[in-house]
Amino acid sequence: MRNKTKFILNIILLIIFFTLVIGYSYYKAQNLIKGPIILIETIQDGDLVKESFIEIRGKVKNVAHLSLNDRKIFINESGVFNESLILNPGYNIITIKAVDKFDKETIKELKIVYQAEEE
């Protein structure tokens, strides 16, 4: 009877251990599974702006390379980026592309309309 209880307890502890290992592995692998993440803070898709000079600021996670309209931009160690851009009058498409170290790619397109103020 005592051996049977000990055996069941060992099985339960083993199941708990493997559940914790699998859960922790999944938690750590989420960055690999999700790929790069882009968060834009200053402008949003569909915005109407009155000035031709805009600042694009945001934060990225899990990124090795970042580009704005196919031009490489730099991020600090916290993943924050800040770039200035001059818009053409009318409809503008801004493309932000992030690539992680495993070549997973995330692309975020912002469609912005620049409408100059009439004087």
Image (spheres, rainbow, N blue to C red):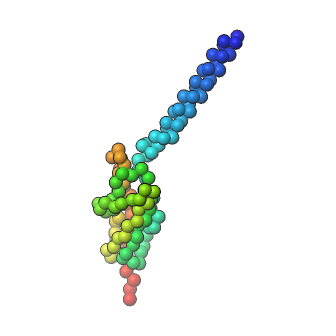
Residue 102: image quadrant is top left
Looking at the image, how many numbered discs can be counted on the residues? 0
At 47% from the left and 43% from the top, the residue drawn is 30
Vertical position of residue 57 compared to residue 22: above or below: below
Locate residue 9, reporting x and y percent.
Answer: 65, 20
On screen, residue 12 versus residue 70, left or right, reads: right
Locate residue 8, reporting x and y percent.
Answer: 64, 18
Is residue 111 among the parts visible in the rendering? no
Locate residue 109, reporting x and y percent.
Answer: 37, 60
On screen, residue 18 versus residue 33, left or right, reads: right
Considering every residue shown, the one lying at the far left of the view is 70
Vertical position of residue 78 compared to residue 101: above or below: below
Residue 6: image quadrant is top right
In front of the other: 80 or 109: 80
At 37% from the left and 67% from the top, the residue drawn is 83
Quadrant placement of the N terminus: top right
Residue 94: image quadrant is bottom left
Is residue 13 among the parts visible in the rendering? yes
On screen, residue 99 versus residue 18, left or right, reads: left
On screen, residue 16 versus residue 89, left or right, reads: right
In front of the other: 15 or 94: 15
Vertical position of residue 42 compared to residue 51: above or below: above
At 61% from the left and 25% from the top, the residue drawn is 13
Quadrant placement of the C terminus: bottom left
Locate residue 111, reporting x and y percent.
Answer: 38, 66
At 43% from the left and 65% from the top, the residue drawn is 57
